[in-house]
Image: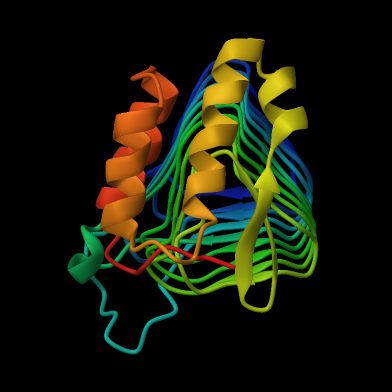
């Protein structure tokens, strides 16, 4: 463990083996930082509110603010949480808020995510694993991002939206409805325009699986069909691969509404 002489670390904090905390950092309140995590200069972790738990092998860059109070008028000094998993890179000046009681009490970041500079993740957001969030992207509260999604720069996402697995939001897009898995979406407001073929290929989906996914997405893009009809056609015409089952489950589970061109 290496804590710079200018850093301020709360007596409540629990710091793991091999952690590095750089110059002028502030670790305040009920905070846990896992083994081998590196915190660069001027970062602030924790606050007088809630609890922050950070796993092992994370890289937290300069100026990040993790675990401040939720930016919600109804938020009070409650025992809510921010939970960050293992192996994440959190860029310069990223802000991630605590959860709220009405949102389940926790903001949760999974494992091996890359959150680039100046991004904001609001209260009660949930990130799965292997997500990339590019510079300046802003997530409002209660946003759910499934695994391997990629959000380009200066993207905005409104409250309660879900971004599906392996989806790709083009730079400058704004999403106010659920973006289905495996799609490339763009616009204001963002809608799916194509299959994320490159992302699927890089992720190791074989040609047969990619073909089934493309067929399912093309059915979704037929605006002459309701979502219920889309699901029925996909289930009738596409092989019941895990990827297809996840796709139809996502569509069925949409409370916000599915974005469509």
Residue 170 picture quarter:
bottom right
Residue at x-position 47% and y-position 55%: 46
> Is residue 101 found left or right of 184 in the rendered image?
left
Residue 119 percent location from the top left of the image: 69, 61
Q: In this view, does 188 lie above or below 161?
A: below
> Is residue 155 found left or right of 96 in the rendered image?
right
Residue 171 picture quarter:
bottom right
> Is residue 169 found left or right of 53 in the rendered image?
right
| One can see residue 106 in this view | no
Residue 180 percent location from the top left of the image: 49, 50
Residue 17 percent location from the top left of the image: 55, 15
Residue at x-position 21% and y-position 58%: 104
Residue 64 picture quarter:
bottom right
Residue at x-position 40% and y-position 38%: 247
In which quadrant is the C terminus drawn? Answer: bottom right
Query: 28 or 255: nearer the eye?
Result: 255
Residue at x-position 62% and y-position 77%: 189
């Amino acid at each position: 463990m290496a804590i710079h002489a200018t850093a301020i670390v709360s007596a409540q904090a629990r710091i793991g083996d091999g952690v590095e905390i750089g110059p002028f950092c502030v670790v305040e309140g009920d905070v846990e930082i896992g083994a081998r995590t590196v915190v660069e200069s001027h970062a602030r972790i924790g606050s007088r509110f809630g609890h922050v738990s950070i796993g092992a092998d994370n890289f937290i860059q300069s100026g990040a603010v993790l675990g401040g109070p939720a930016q919600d008028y109804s938020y009070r000094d409650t025992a809510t949480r921010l939970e960050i998993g293992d192996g994440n890179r959190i860029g310069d000046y990223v802000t991630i808020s605590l959860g709220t009681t009405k949102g389940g009490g926790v903001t949760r970041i999974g494992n091996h995510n890359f959150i680039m500079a100046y991004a904001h993740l609001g209260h009660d957001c949930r990130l799965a694993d292997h997500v990339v969030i590019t510079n300046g992207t802003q997530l409002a509260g209660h946003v759910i991002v499934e695994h391997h999604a990629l959000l380009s720069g200066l993207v905005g996402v409104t409250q309660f939206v879900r971004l599906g697995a392996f989806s790709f939001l083009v730079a400058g897009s704004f999403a106010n409805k659920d973006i289905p898995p495996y799609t490339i979406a763009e616009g204001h407001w963002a809608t799916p325009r194509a299959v994320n073929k490159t992302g699927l290929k890089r992720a190791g989906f074989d040609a047969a699986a990619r073909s089934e996914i493309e067929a399912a997405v093309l059915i979704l893009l037929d605006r002459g069909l309701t979502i219920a009809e889309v699901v029925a056609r996909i289930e009738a015409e596409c092989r019941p691969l895990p990827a297809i089952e996840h796709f139809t489950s996502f569509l069925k589970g949409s409370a916000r509404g599915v974005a469509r061109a």
